[in-house]
Image (cartoon, rainbow, N blue to C red):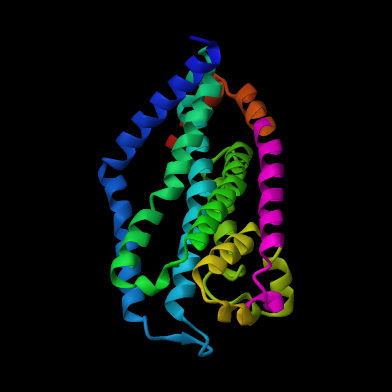
Amino acid sequence: MSIRTALLKAAWQQAKVTLWRKYWSPAGISTLVVPLILLAILWFVRDAQIRDLIPVTGWIFSGTLAFGLIAGAALGVSADIQQEREDGTLLRAKAIPRGLTGHLLAKLVVAVVDTAIPVVPLVVGAAIILPDLLPTDPTRWLLFVMIYALAAAAMLPWGAVLGSLFRSALGLGIASLALYGLAAISGLFYPLTALPAALQVIGQFTPHYWIGLGIRAVLLDDAAMALEVGGSWRIPLMLGVLAAWAVVGFLLAPKLLRRMARKTSGSAVSEARERVLSRGY
């Protein structure tokens, strides 16, 4: 067995163990509660319209899918990396030959599953109680899978970037609040054109907007284009922007992760543990 094959096998085994423990725990099972609550809300507002053009349910549903991906990919990965740096997990992985590489590969597999887990109950539930929310054209489903995969690729490395830059849970929490703030001005849950012109410009500089735009292009009728900037889905531009975020992220993340790994030591782990015990973060 080659070194590369052994590395991939070890990463896969670690990812399976992590996912089993995570989603068979009370916290993991509770992740199904949020989709159920959202589906109940969508059922009660199913007759509401946005400017008499499209149902409110469609915009909320697409925005929730987009934000779930962003939160799972960026915030989930960053929180895991920051925690593992402080509890010594990365230090132990670094002590094993190629252990850090295998650990990060396993983390990537787990992160991909984490971004997909919220989608399944939402899509299945919507297919049962609100089938009009989902496309019936196979081409649109193919486009949905492509956009979702590209969006995940655009956000996963930036989660690693955040996790490597912030050395405490407090700093990472502030960065997470900033991501939530960007979601509020990126058109995920209401049309970006309803905001002032300056915020429309800022919103289009975030990956949030382009991820939401791509998912809306698949799930909503073409009548909803009247609510978009420029009155169009701008699919080629959307794909290009997400690809650019992915490329820059994958170029930047490995460098920052290697720098973080070099700075991880036993004394740094002890210092972090003492800080958490004394300050709580």
Q: Is residue 247 above or below residue 241?
A: above
Q: Quadrant of residue 249?
A: top right
Q: Residue at x 44, y 20 (%)?
A: 10
Q: Position of residue 214 (x, y in %)?
A: 59, 63
Q: Residue at x 33, y 52 (%)?
A: 31
Give the magenta part as a residue range.
228-254
Was residue 145 drawn as part of the magenta stretch in this picture?
A: no
Q: Quadrant of residue 32?
A: bottom left
Q: Position of residue 53 (x, y in %)?
A: 52, 86
Seen as rendered, the residue at the extreme front is 138
Q: Position of residue 279 (x, y in %)?
A: 47, 41
Q: Residue at x 73, y 70 (%)?
A: 201
| Residue 84 horizontal side relative to residue 23, left or right | right
Q: Position of residue 65 (x, y in %)?
A: 46, 61
Seen as rendered, the residue at the extreme top is 1
Q: Is residue 83 above or below residue 269?
A: below
| Residue 264 horizontal side relative to residue 255, left or right | left
Was residue 235 drawn as part of the magenta stretch in this picture?
A: yes
**Residue nearest the viewer, comparing 256 with 143:** 143
Q: Is residue 145 above or below residue 199?
A: above
Is there any visible trace of residue 279 in the rendered image? no
**Residue nearest the viewer, comparing 32 with 78:** 32
Q: Residue at x 62, y 48 (%)?
A: 154
Q: Main secondary structure of the magenta part?
A: helix
Is there any visible trace of residue 2 in the rendered image? yes
